[in-house]
Amino acid sequence: MQTHSSSPAIDASRVAPKKLSGLPLLGEKERRTEQYCLNSRFLYAALKGNLEEGRKLIEMGADINAKNSSGITALMDCTLAGHMEFAKFLLENGIDKNARDMDGHTARAYVFCGHIEMRQFLIGHGVES
């Protein structure tokens, strides 16, 4: 009995799941999609002040310096909403404190008047204006 295969040889590295923070992925496109999802969830956690979720997402592989399409970072998001504990977590874990959005603003530009403590905290940690 003859077996003929019209399909090319299988590349085992493309078939065997790769790991990114415990998530099985098949290829580069899927890895980028998964990273995008982790980063988006991380930015949302910062905006909502959900520190537990933010820590979990960093452990899963979210990029602490992720930006949305407008260049807004997690530090900008949590500053805007006045989430001091989340801001402390980010600064303690190496976020680029002087990252700029698409308009050239840093996190200090996202502080509202009512968040004087946050403004002082950012200044004390050397965040530029």
Image (cartoon, helix red, strand yellow):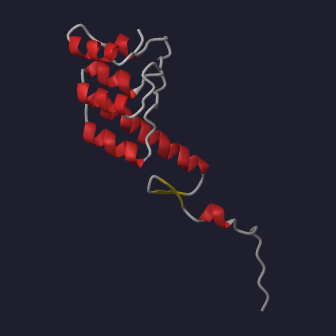
Residue at 49% x, 43% y: name it.
Answer: 35
Counting from the top left corner in percent of width and height, residue 59 is at 38, 47
Image coords of residue 37 (percent x, y): 44, 41
As drawn, 82 above or below 19: above
* Residue at left offset 30%, top offset 25%: 78
Q: Residue at x 37, y 21 (%)?
A: 76
Q: How many marks?
A: 0
33 up-or-down from 20: above or below: above
**Could you say which is closer to the camera, residue 102 or residue 126?**
126
- Identity of the residue drawn at 23% across and 7% down: 113
Is 81 situated above or below 90? above
22 vs 18, left or right, is left
Q: Residue furthest bottom?
A: 1
Q: Which quarter shows the C terminus?
A: top left
Which quadrant holds the N terminus?
Answer: bottom right
Residue 97, image x and y in percent?
42, 22
Does residue 100 appear left or right of residue 16 in this picture?
left
Displayed quadrant of residue 109: top left
Q: Residue 83: x and y, percent?
A: 24, 25
Depth check, front residue: 7 or 25? 25
State which quadrant residue 107 falls in.
top left
